[in-house]
Amino acid sequence: MAISSAAAQRSYSAPCPGCGAPVNFVSAQSSHAVCGYCQSTVVRDGETLKRIGKMAELFDDHSPLQLQTSGTWNGQAFTLVGRLQYKYGEGTWTEWHAVLADGSSAYLSEDNGAYVFTTAQAVQQAVPEAERFRVGATTAINGKSYTVASNQAVQLIAAQGELPRLPGLGAQHAMVELRSQNGAALLSGATAQLHAAEEVLSIDYSTQPPAVSKGVAVLLEDLKLTGLHDASAKDEKGRQFACPNCGAALTVQLATSKSMTCGSCHSIIDLSQGIGGELKHAIQDEPVQPLIPLGSTGLLQGVQWQVVGFKHRMGFEPSDPEEHFGWEEYLLYNAKRGFTFLVDSTEGWSIVKPATGAPVVSSNGQSASYLGTSYTLKESYNAETNYVLGEFYWQVSRGQKTSNRDYASGKSLLSMEQSAQELTWSVGGRIDSAVVVKAFKLEDKKDLLQRSDVGPFTAAKSPFARPEFMIFVVFVVVVLMFSRCSSCDPQVENCSSSSGRTSGGSYGGYSGGGGHK
């Protein structure tokens, strides 16, 4: 069993009690393993192995990582020697067991293109029961303040390799995640882009006392990885099945997709339980056509993205449900960067990504601070998804509701979305409509994609602040709106409400599948 020399130590090998094949242990801290030949789950007891069951087969998540992938983190070499696959209500994620050069264990968590490196964390006081952690509330662990981002019932669905511990297969247990920003943003040498030193504290209730781990967000290119999956050798053929509503032939393109829509009848199909059994579906009426077609690829911020999903959403004033507005979100995918959102609202285009850390919100909720930038509250509203197309890495459904807050600081945007089980922050910024047109080569739709752009604006000096110019702008906007739809309906169109509101809606997206990371 090959392992990087920096992490090498005395290894142990014994025959599998199920099939006789050798089962190897590299880490002295590993007590469990899954035989790579017969999937027997074995526990190490001195110099012998005891079979305690059989592990379910791993599902192919098309991860670039695999056992024996090696890299460097925090100045130490490491090698991945085990894998745990977990499932919760709206998605799945993977925990890779890493052995560090000093012989200690760590985990590299992978969730739809987002990665967090975690190590065990000692706590000064007993951890409260999971029910005590309310999503959205703040709490202190070891004297540091965290926001409760997620409180979910999860279960282990598969495992591979050697592991320091092994939760019961299929048994549900609570998993609470706390988030905090940890200092300023860092400059990634591999990408020359800023990424945040964001901290995640995970509390795993599969053991007693609960296991606590602390992690920091990382980018794969910063880990200097070797031994990755050979993408050219990977079978990228999609899974095919018949639509349970109309019978049309459908293909799932992404292995991580938990829901998709039928291109013929527009039904939403639940893929969270696989495609072998009876599929659940929900019929959608009043189809909305995205301006950027599904499957399109575009270069944004130096990354090649593919449009894999589309949502139309509605925002409602909590005090006046009659006042509402609509906007659209495109789910973009890149094999190394995971998922991000391109948002189209009446205030312009923006590109945002779910944040790993949690901003600090003022006591009155009117401002938020994140990685050295202060943001001011712009809108508070309730949001609802009322039409979807394409594939999504979480179980999306029509009618999903969240409570939203949007903050802004110049071109920078910060958005909070909260459901009963999860709190998600998204961070990003505005981009010009010309950038969208160029990225996706949509010059023929230039007029349709035109929005309020994000150039610098100083009211005291700008000639565009003159009243006659503003009247002209209002006139042009009205003409464009009526040229696109004779009667602007925010349920099927990206437009403001009849009261004249022009809110930009959410800057992010309800990313239920991204909750763990």
Image: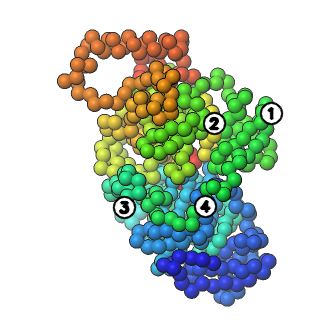
Determine whether the residue tagged by mark 2 lies in a helix, strand or loop: strand
Q: Pointer 4 and pointer 2: residues touching (CB < 8 Å)? A: no
- Distance from Cα at disc 1 to Cα at disc 4: 35 Å
Q: Quadrant of residue 217?
A: bottom left
Q: Look at label 2 and name its amino acid.
A: Gly
Determine whether the residue tagged by mark 3 lies in a helix, strand or loop: strand
Upstream in sequence: badge 1 or badge 4 = 4
* Labelled disc at residue 144: 3
Q: Look at label 3 and name its amino acid.
A: Lys
The residue at the point 40 percent across, 60 percent down is 140
Residue 354 position in % (x across, y down)? 47, 46
Upstream in sequence: badge 1 or badge 2 = 1
Q: Look at label 4 and name its amino acid.
A: His
* Labelled disc at residue 247: 1
Q: Nearer the viewer, residue 99 or 514?
A: 99
The residue at the point 44 percent across, 49 percent down is 355
- Distance from Cα at disc 4 to Cα at disc 2: 27 Å
Upstream in sequence: badge 1 or badge 3 = 3
Residue 112 position in % (x across, y down)? 56, 51
Q: Which residue is mark 2?
A: 390
Q: Is residue 213 left or right of residue 414?
A: right
